[in-house]
Image: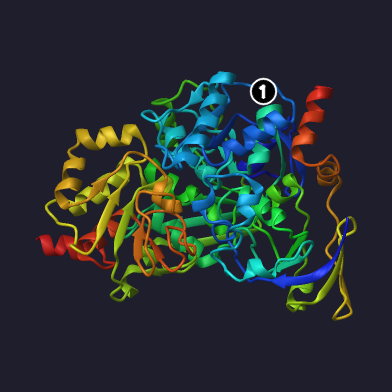
Amino acid sequence: MLFKSEIIKCGDNVDTDVIIPARYLNSSDPKELAAHVFDDLDPNLKQKIKKGCILVAGKNFGCGSSREHAPIAIKASGISCVIAVSFARIFYRNAINIGLPILECKEAVEEAEEGDEFIVDFETGKIQNVTKDRSYNAGGFPPFIKEIITKGGIISFAAERMKQNV
Amino acid sequence: MGMTITQKILADHTGKKYVEPGELILADVDMVLGNDITAPVAIKEFYKSGCKKVFDRKKIALVPDHFAPNKDIKSAQQCKTVRDFAREQGIENYFEVGKMGIEHALLPEKGMVVPGDLVIGADSHTCTYGALGAFSTGVGSSDMAAAMMMGKIWFKVPETIKFIFNGKLNPWVTGKDLILYTIGQIGVDGALYKAMEFSGEAITSLSMDERFSITNMAVEAGAKSGIIAPDQKTIKYVEERSNKPYNIYESDDDAEYSEIFEFDCSQIEPQVALPHLPENTVGISSIDHILIDQVVIGSCTNGRIEDMRAAAKILKNQKVHPYVRLIIIPATQEVYLQCIKEGIIEIFIEAGAVVSTPTCGPCLGGYMGILAEGEKALATTNRNFVGRMGHPKSEVYLSNPAVAAASAVMGRIASPEEVIKNAV
């Protein structure tokens, strides 16, 4: 998976309540959720999201509730990939489980400015800031996790195991 | 190398003698939990996979508590999805309105989690059961679906941070204050991906209800889990409620910790977390005239019987300030009934509070007490993020139940001593 796009930036501790406020959790439809993504963080942020764009965030992105609606809303909004200094752990799991590519890379985040052009190779974890002519290595995922991702997420992974009866 | 209590539970659920931090494991689960927000997504994934039957209908708990009793048509549809699934699959632990309570108060109360268990729940506050000496952690809906299929879940074995609380607690200081204080010290990502192990004489002195408040908020420091080694209080609590066999684990003396913090409880006063992060904690004495519009006493953090008793102690023969709305929500039907038996509900209503049936409701800005623009609330809940209880320009402060009750009387964030002193 290779992503090439301008980036949009947000800060530290962006929580799941501002990613998708609970008042919209009476639906789990990705389109409905995407219509309200980041409503309480910055009402203008949604307008900046173009199809395929890369979100660059600070530390502890996705902290708070376990709602899978948060990565679902982000993915359905058109964001292709999220790079952060760190992710809150449930968000991290959920993103992997629903197939939203995420990478942790402090340096890439700190040196990035809104609008920079990024190229991200999800397989190798290589991140290029084309605008600033800098490249970084976020590291790849361990084989166990790659297996989940290559099988198309945790559900397909589990379904296959059920068939093999292991 | 010795193991922490967390490593031991994970090793035993993986069929291994030893697991080390960082190791990826596929572990057996003893209980899989979901609610009316997260379970519908999991149920959809479950069916999509082609799976017909859950791995064990006795090891799944479904609790519609967030937007139940149904707050609107969409919520009613979500609750119906959960109900239909529970009936079709013969889920033993489905709790209908009337039996339902806030999930993390309900499961321990019903004896559904015991020491040594491995529990996952599609709700971030699933970490609550660590107070019983169980490993429990919040996951998302897809994880819940996969666990309902396989009875297993993948984990990275966490490192553990040890917290030792020395000394005796000051008046009006509770488990809630210790965890708020801790989060204030280490920050909302201070324990990211890690297990928090709470120990020391101050922890031993706490009741089970107060211990639940502590482990409940481990996630607010970014932790995977929070845990307290079982003692006689734990065993008594469990044996009164459960026939399930349990396993007592303890950390080895030579267990490895990534960090150790020691706190002197004589230095800790009742805490208040200011907007908009639980790490923004200050002692009650440094609060300067913050007027409030609403107080909420309840939630999976502080909706248990001792929390109700603490509020009642303050509210007895007092009146809620005319500019404040006080909303009290006992976390379960058992807590509610006990409040009635002890005359606590009468104290609340005479004081001018409203008492609600169990629900998560206002804690996450669902319903039953949403804030308008510019309003301020003091709540015994667990999060004070932007917009958490309503309008994005409203504010939430967090405290223990006695501080919350005192503040409802005074109309501003206040120490319980102010009310008790005035009453004399």
- Nearest to the observer: residue B146 or residue B316: B146
Q: Which residue is mark 1?
A: B55
Q: Chain of mark 1?
A: B
Q: Secondary structure at mark 1?
A: loop
Name the residue rendered at 78%, 55% in the picture.
A101
Q: Is residue B396 above or below residue A99?
A: below
Q: How many marks?
A: 1
Residue B201 visible? The answer is no
- Crowding at label 1, few (<14), some or many (≥20) Cα neighbours within 10 Å? some
User: Looking at the picture, how far across and down is residue B222, in whole percent?
Assistant: 59, 57
User: What amino acid type is highlighted by mark number 1?
Assistant: Phe
Say which quadrant the C terminus of chain B sits in: bottom left
Q: Residue pushed farthest bottom?
A: A132
Q: Does any portion of residue B237 appear in the rendered image? A: yes
* Up/down of A28 relative to B248, above or below: below
Query: From the viewer's perspective, is B237 left or right of B15?
Result: left
The residue sitting at 28% across, 55% down in the picture is B402
Looking at the image, residue A160 sits to the left or right of residue B88; the answer is: right
| Residue located at (65% from left, 71% from top) | A10
Residue B364 % position (x, y):
46, 52
- In this picture, residue B22 sits left or right of residue A59: right
For the N terminus of chain B, which image quadrant? top right
Q: Residue at x 59, y 20 (%)?
A: B89
Tell me where residue B251 sits by quadrant: top right
Name the spot of residue A16 as percent of width and height, x first.
58, 57
Q: Position of residue B232 (x, y in %)?
A: 42, 35
Q: Furthest-left residue in view? A: B424
| Nearest the eye: B107 or B140 | B140
Closer to the camera in the image, B367 or B55:
B367
Drawn side of residue B412 relative to residue B377, left or right = left
